[in-house]
Image (cartoon, helix red, strand yellow):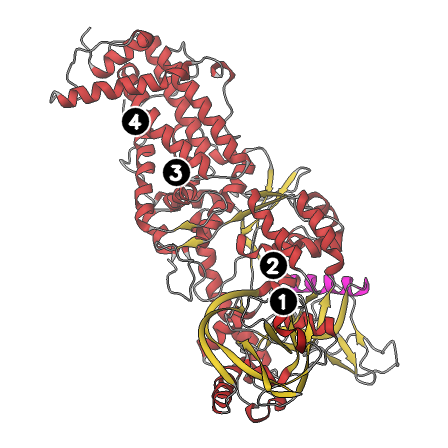
Amino acid sequence: MEPKITEKAWNPELEHQVLKKWEESGLYDFVLKENNYTIDTPPPYPSGRPWHIGAASHYSQIDMIARTARMAGKNVYFPIGIDRNGLPVEIYTEKKHKIRMRETERGKFLDLCKEALDDLESEMIQIMKSLGISGGIKDHYRTDSEEYRALTQATFIDLWKKGQIYLATRPNNYDWVSGTTIADAEITYLDLSTKLVYMKFKVKENPQQEIVIASTRPELLCACKTIIVNEEDERYTDLVGQKIVVPITNQEVEVRTHHSAQKEFGTGAVMVCSYGDQNDVALFRELKLEEVVAIGLDGRMTDVAGDYSGLKPKQARTKIIEDLEERGFIEKVEEISHRTPVSERSKNPIEIIPMEEYYLKQMDSVKKMKELGMQITFHPQMHKQILMNWLESISIDWPISRRRYYGTEIPIWYCKECSEPHVPEPGKYYRPWKETCPIKECSKCKGTEFTGEERTFDTWMDSSISPLFVTKFNKDEEFFKKTYPTAIRPQAKDIVRTWLYYTLLRCDLLTGKKPWSEAWIMGYGLDEKGMKMSKSKGNALDPLPVIERLGADTFRFWSASEVNQGYDFRCSEQKMDSTKKFLSKLWNVSRFLSSFDVVESANLAATDKWILAELNSLITECQKGYEKYNFFIPAIAIREFTWNLFAANYIEMVKARAYGIGFSDEEKEAAIFTLHKVLSTILKLLAPITPFITDHLWQTLYSDDSIHKQKQAEIDPEFSDTKYDKFTKEITEFNSKVWNEKKDKGLSLKDSIKITIPDNLTMFSKDFVSMHNIEE
């Protein structure tokens, strides 16, 4: 009989046909029902080249979550969005057009940002389609749409009216290059080379006596307000309470004791400046010190720096070290690697500057966030600790205002007479920097003229309402009730302290409910050397050429079999190439079986019962992985079973029987029944991971309906307690023994051989004899 599958190999070009069929049939269109499973899908950010291969792997596995849930009988709502706010697109636009944001008319700059995003987004959507993402791609949302921004503003207005928002001037992390405040959660640390300067401070009452203080920020001497030492440090006991003269500036400061001074670090004496680091911020508050603003919004030293005013901090540092050296105030200078706080997005070292910003209260919610965090199931569990560690570190409320252009505008107008802030009614998208105030009269002084706020929100203010936007919060009450809280939040581990945390906070403040019950966390995509992939480093592999060359299923199976849940993973094209061999094996097995019509039932032989018992074990193992959305487990188990048990052993044992060579029709039907039973089950088990090849083979061999409409395979009780799987080791060892003996004797696999079948395997004798051509 001729095989139904005529192609001799799986051709990735067939994926285009399968994809077209899915789109035309509306296979993945969501229809609202009572029991819905909502995925709070991360909207990817297009900046520069849209995705590297690690990110594509991430979204492939998010799609595996959706497909797994569907085959588990859930009504999956899998929205797709694109995150289009914030600093990265502004930086990209400035570089692309060789312009500066603040030197460009705001409306024109916004248009240029939008054009850049449109181009980058189209490629990102193409990658998603190519990967077979089974979500709402055709009606994807954008976080810079008027509808989305209107909801961001509405949630702000709601929290404003609840007293959760306030305006305050406080020391803030400041990225002077991009000219905006950034939250603690947006800071990362780099080990940068710098100088540790050991400076001599004179004691006022005894100029012959000195304190040596080591600092990496000598340019902040003008902002020094006290010297602290540890109360147990006997070297400084006699100096506590005395006045010390700061070199160069000559101001007098007092020596105090404080537990944060470490006897073992540097010289044990620490100068406290406004503001060298977050410890300085805390000390200024605790000790009620008067701040000195040494660095301005332009990132340069202010007038209080005297001769160094107008210099950038790094320039001032170099110059002041030279002057200290010249005047004899330096004991020594060491070159060190210093853990330096930088902006996570721009990688610019941050300064701490007092600024007036809007804050969202979060300190009051830390305890509640810990409780909600404990209620969320993390996959893997170890990444829950990232959230808990972050919650322990929160020390101030969240500064939510930014001095940038491409973001959701803060919907506030100020009375020109009394400066009273006013927020409009929610529901519309407002742009106060260019629109007339919708409020006619000031509630405080009855004034009628207003000035619009020019600042935008921190981009996490937008991103953190994604589960509310996709479930139509404040728009469609029935839809919201049936889809919120969402079921799961899949995301990368590096934004647990930002996106996951801020979403948890905001949704609780707005709805009183946690936004999801599960969080699925993925590690970083690394290059072949184990370095984190990034576009800026130039080590990011472009996924589209790889997908076009190898096919999406090859890429997806590589992702599942390479990436153990939650861990970092290396991206190697060579490994992806080798993955294709498994799909070729699956194709060859399917092509062989396509020569035989499906048999609905049969009287099974011992060999058939053995492989079906092993199939039950495979189903059980796959279920363990799929229940935890750990696709590494089923991928490895399916490959091992298909290649080494089903293809290498069972198929070879029953091939002659399936053809009816030397066997009865009843025995032949048993083999064919079992072959199709096993293959159809493998296809269903593999469908969430490799959706194209499995659907193509399923519809060619078993049904006109897509495999993605099927329920996941379940164990067959008939074979769950047969104990036939106890023979697996002996069966495979006997087959290997025969193959090796034939090889040693220079025989082909088809040649006959005299060999004794072990007594405990006699029930499989007939299949062994036909397989190996054993002379009885």
Q: CA distance from mark 1 to mark 4?
A: 60 Å
Residue that numbered label 2 is attached to: 498
First in sequence: mark 1 vs mark 2:
1
Q: Nearer the viewer, mark 1 or mark 3?
A: 1
In the image, the segment drawn in magenta is 148-163
Q: Where in the figure is residue 474, as x and y percent of width and height?
A: 74, 55
Q: Secondary structure at mark 4?
A: helix
Three-letter residue code for mark 2:
Thr
At label 4, counting other C-alpha atoms closer than 10 Å, the crowd grade (few under 14, some 14-19, many 20 or more) is: some
Q: Where is mark 3, residue-wise?
A: 693
Amino acid type of the residue tagged 3 in the rendering: Ile
Residue drawn at x 66%, y 64% is 149
Residue 27 makes an appearance in the image: no
Residue located beneath label 4 in the image: 592
Q: Is residue 390 above or below residue 719?
A: below
Q: CA distance from mark 2 to mark 4?
A: 52 Å
| Image coordinates for residue 746, horizontal then vertical, percent | 11, 22
Is mark 1 in CB contact (under 8 Å) with mark 2? yes
User: Which element carries disc 2, helix, strand or loop?
Assistant: helix
Residue 409 occupies which quadrant of the picture?
A: bottom right
Picture layout, residue 309 above or below residue 6: below
Label at residue 183: 1
Alpha-carbon distance for marks 2 and 3? Answer: 38 Å
